[in-house]
């Protein structure tokens, strides 16, 4: 990962040469090609102005995160930092607790509040107001900025109804959190053909609702959490690629949750980019 992030592969000057065969001939592929062309033109202009583009735009920051589910595994990776003396979970940069394991008196919460990493917790519409406040105080007693991320997972339609309540509870309590959307887990269903799947339209709707609610509440949407793969799988239905219930079996290879395939992920990336462009233009 470090080699890809820092070795030049992630350089902006390579956007036109990244492997994009899987979207050739699609609307997403054309949008990407147009974007890469504009990036190349901007880099050429910067170089003409004397900017050292090769060194200033040749790498990217790359961070890892996962759910702290198996406590024996996570405990084996806890180390004390030699400089600060603080304990860190070294299995990832950010660790999070799932919706089903976030009990205040549970072992998962105990191990999470004892490490100095930035940490996250999944929350749904099921969480009560005071429970949310107690959860934040447990994991971030000093109320430090950047310490705690709340990852919402509710489902399309339900998030628009319930997220404003959570935002206002956190704001009224004066708590510092980062809000992240997980539009995947609240939209899981069983297809007519018997496969565990998710509909692209529902994923997109919950993501759009996330941005809309934060804009209405004058809050900051801090990030998104997706389950995706660079492979051309058939696990989530819909999107421009047109996966249906009937052809889920063509390349359904996940051993756990259904993931967005390469085309669906790129399509969703352009949805997010469009929102960010709109937000920037309105500022």
Image (tube, grey):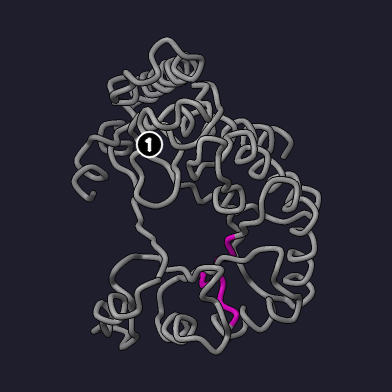
Image position, residue 237 (x, y; %): 53, 32
How crowded pointer 1 is (Cα within 10 Å; few <14, some 14-19, many 20+) is rated as some
Up the image or down, 224 lies above or below 91; here it is above
Task: Work out whether residue 13 or residue 200 is closer to the camera in this orientation and state it.
Answer: 200
Q: Residue at x 63, y 72 (%)?
A: 176
Task: Work out whether residue 26 or residue 156 is closer to the camera in this orientation and state it.
Answer: 156
Numbered range of the magenta stretch: 143-151
Instruction: Give the quadrant of residue 80.
Output: bottom left
- 215 displayed left or right of 71: right
Q: Residue at x 53, y 26 (%)?
A: 244
**Farthest front residue in view:** 193
Q: Quadrant of the C terminus?
A: top right
Image position, residue 61 (x, y; %): 35, 50
Q: Is residue 14 magenta?
A: no
Up the image or down, 46 lies above or below 88; here it is above
Image position, residue 171 (x, y; %): 75, 70
Up the image or down, 56 lies above or below 23; here it is below
**Farthest top residue in view:** 25
Question: In the structure shown, which secondary structural element does the residue marked by tag 1 occupy?
Answer: loop
- Report how many numbered discs are placed on residues in the image: 1
Instruction: Give the quadrant of residue 15.
Output: top left
- 155 displayed left or right of 75: right
The residue indicated by pointer 1 is 252
Up the image or down, 41 lies above or below 152; here it is above
Q: Residue at x 56, y 65 (%)?
A: 122
Q: Residue at x 50, y 86 (%)?
A: 106
- 200 displayed left or right of 15: right
Task: Work out whether residue 223 or residue 186 is closer to the camera in this orientation and state it.
Answer: 186
Image position, residue 133 (x, y; %): 69, 79
């Amino acid at each position: 990962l470090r080699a890809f992030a820092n070795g030049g592969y992630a350089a902006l000057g390579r956007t036109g040469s990244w492997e994009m065969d899987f979207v050739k001939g699609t609307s997403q592929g054309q949008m990407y090609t147009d974007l890469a062309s504009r990036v190349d033109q901007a880099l050429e202009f910067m170089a003409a102005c004397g900017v050292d583009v090769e060194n200033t735009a040749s790498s990217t920051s790359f961070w890892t995160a996962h759910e702290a589910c198996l406590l024996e595994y996570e405990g084996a990776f806890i180390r004390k930092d030699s400089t600060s003396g603080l304990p860190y979970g070294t299995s990832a940069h950010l660790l999070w607790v799932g919706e089903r394991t976030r009990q205040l008196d549970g072992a998962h919460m105990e191990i999470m509040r004892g490490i100095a990493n930035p940490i996250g917790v999944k929350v749904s519409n099921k969480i009560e107001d005071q429970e949310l406040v107690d959860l934040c105080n447990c994991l971030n007693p000093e109320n430090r900025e950047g310490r705690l991320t709340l990852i919402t997972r509710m489902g399309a339609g339900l998030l628009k109804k319930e997220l404003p309540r959570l935002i206002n509870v956190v704001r009224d309590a004066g708590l510092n959190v980062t809000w992240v959307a997980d539009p995947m887990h609240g939209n899981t269903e069983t297809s007519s053909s018997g496969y565990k799947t998710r509909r692209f339209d529902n994923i997109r709707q919950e993501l759009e609702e996330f941005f809309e609610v934060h804009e209405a509440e004058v809050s900051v949407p801090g990030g998104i959490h997706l389950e995706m793969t660079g492979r051309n799988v058939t696990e989530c239905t819909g999107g421009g690629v047109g996966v249906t219930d009937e052809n889920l079996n063509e390349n359904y290879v996940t051993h756990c949750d259904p993931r967005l395939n390469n085309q669906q992920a790129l399509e969703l990336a352009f949805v997010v980019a469009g929102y960010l462009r709109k937000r920037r233009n309105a500022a």
